[in-house]
Amino acid sequence: MLVIGVTGNIGSGKSTVCQILARLGAVIIDADKLAQETYKPHSRTWKELIDTFGKGILNPDEEINRQRLADIVFSQPEALARLNQIVHSAAYRLAKDRIETYRQQEAKIVVLEATLLIEANWLDLVDKVWLVAAPQDMVVQRVNRDRGVDESEVLARLRSQMPAEEKMKYADEIIYNDGDISHLESKVTELWHKYSREP
């Protein structure tokens, strides 16, 4: 079984790449969804987050208000690092378990989609790293269009992430998402055929 880590900064198009890979036959594990699972009320991670950031991050139904938590951490590097440490270690364990389950099911190619694959030190979970990169102006446009986030917030989030140029040092493949969807599909399909042929 081959495990491919697909990474890239906000708005680069990693989710679109993973949708294409799913259509081609890959099994996708989404690290964001795993992280959301760790936030479940009364879980170990939920308790740790409240101990660290206070009960003010809770909604009346005891769910964590992720926007309130984001507002606290994005302007404070130490708080962001602490949040990542808590959530990433829990999500890492879930990812490892999922990969092992798919190995037992004899899946051929598993894709782990993770923005912070490199920063969170998850490289030991994957065999290959595919980095999705896009020009900054396209990223700002995309995130504004798809999520309604304004330019200053997109740029702030980009600044909080490791630059794509730095991530390139860890990548086995770099997918430049600087064209239209058909251009991206042909690049991803070409890589899929290359890797699915490998023993």
Image (cartoon, rainbow, N blue to C red):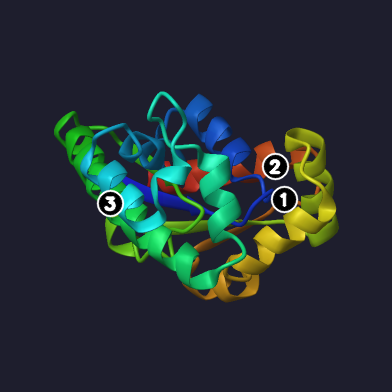
Question: Disc 3 to disc 2, how far (Cα)?
Answer: 40 Å
Residue 84 in the image: above or below residue 55: below
- Residue visible at 51% across and 56% down in the picture: 130
| Residue 21 vs residue 63, the one in the foreground | 63
Label 3: how many Cα within 10 Å (few below 14, some 14–19, many 20+): some
| Residue 91 vs residue 23, the one in the foreground | 91
Q: Which mark is residue 38?
A: none
**Is the residue under label 1 in contact with that under label 3 (CB below 8 Å)?**
no
In the displayed structure image, the side of residue 103 where residue 159 appears, left or right: right
Residue 142, x across and y down, in percent: 79, 43
Q: Which residue is mark 3?
A: 48
Q: Nearer the viewer, mark 3 or mark 2?
A: 3
Q: Which residue is mark 2?
A: 184
- Residue visible at 49% across and 63% down in the picture: 80
- What's the residue type where badge 3 is placed? Glu
- Residue visible at 47% across and 72% down in the picture: 78
Taking the image as drawn, is residue 199 in sight? no
Residue 81, x across and y down, in percent: 44, 67
Q: Which residue is mark 1?
A: 177
**Is the residue under label 1 in contact with that under label 2 (CB below 8 Å)?**
yes
Residue 96 in the image: above or below residue 18: below
| Res 107 → quadrant | top left
Determine the residue located farthest toward the left in the rendered image.
104
